[in-house]
Amino acid sequence: MKTLIFTAFTLIFAGISQVQAFVPVDTTRVYSNGEDDKLRTPVKLEDLTTEVKRTLYNASYYGWNAVSAVWVSSELSHYEVELTNGEEILTLKIDQDGNKM
């Protein structure tokens, strides 16, 4: 009987020691697929600069809705803003001064 209890305890302890802890992923930074050294940081639409918002709300993009934005830190840092119009999707690259790239 002692052997059975000891064996059960050993198996339970061995099983518990094999459990791997959950490691949370840092979602504030998204790295590119290795093509270049870009660091991509998601940005809330309301946090975009006034100049970028002016470009987005220009008459050229009437009917388009901003869906998401990412700040790309690279040699030429810029915002990538995704716009939708129905099923159409458009990605704009805009520098921090509101100029299209």
Image (cartoon, rainbow, N blue to C red):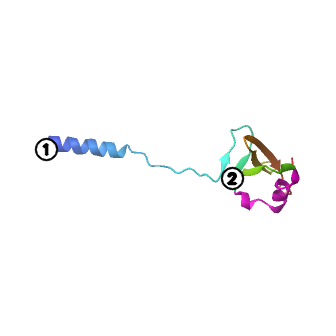
Residue located beneath label 1 in the image: 2
Please state which of residues 1 and 45 is positioned toward the viewer in this rendering: 45
* Residue at figure coordinates x 29%, y 46% from the top left: 13
Q: Secondary structure at mark 1?
A: helix
Amino acid bearing label 1: Lys
- Label 2 crowd bin: few (<14), some (14–19), many (20+), radius 10 Å: some
Q: Position of residue 79 (x, y in %)?
A: 78, 51
Query: Quick check: 50 left or right of 10?
Result: right
Residue located beneath label 2 in the image: 42
* Residue at figure coordinates x 78%, y 44% from the top left: 91
* Magenta residues, start to end: 44-59
Q: Secondary structure at mark 2?
A: strand
Please state which of residues 32 and 95 is positioned toward the viewer in this rendering: 95
Q: Position of residue 99 (x, y in %)?
A: 88, 52
Q: Is residue 75 visible?
A: no
- Vertical side of 96 occupied by 16: above or below: above
Quadrant (top left, top right, bottom left, bottom right) of the N terminus: top left
Q: How many marks?
A: 2
Decide which of tag 1 and tag 2 comes sooner along the chain.
Answer: 1
Helix, strand or loop for the magenta stretch, by majority: helix
Q: Position of residue 74 (x, y in %)?
A: 78, 48
Please state which of residues 68 and 60 is positioned toward the viewer in this rendering: 60
Amino acid bearing label 2: Pro
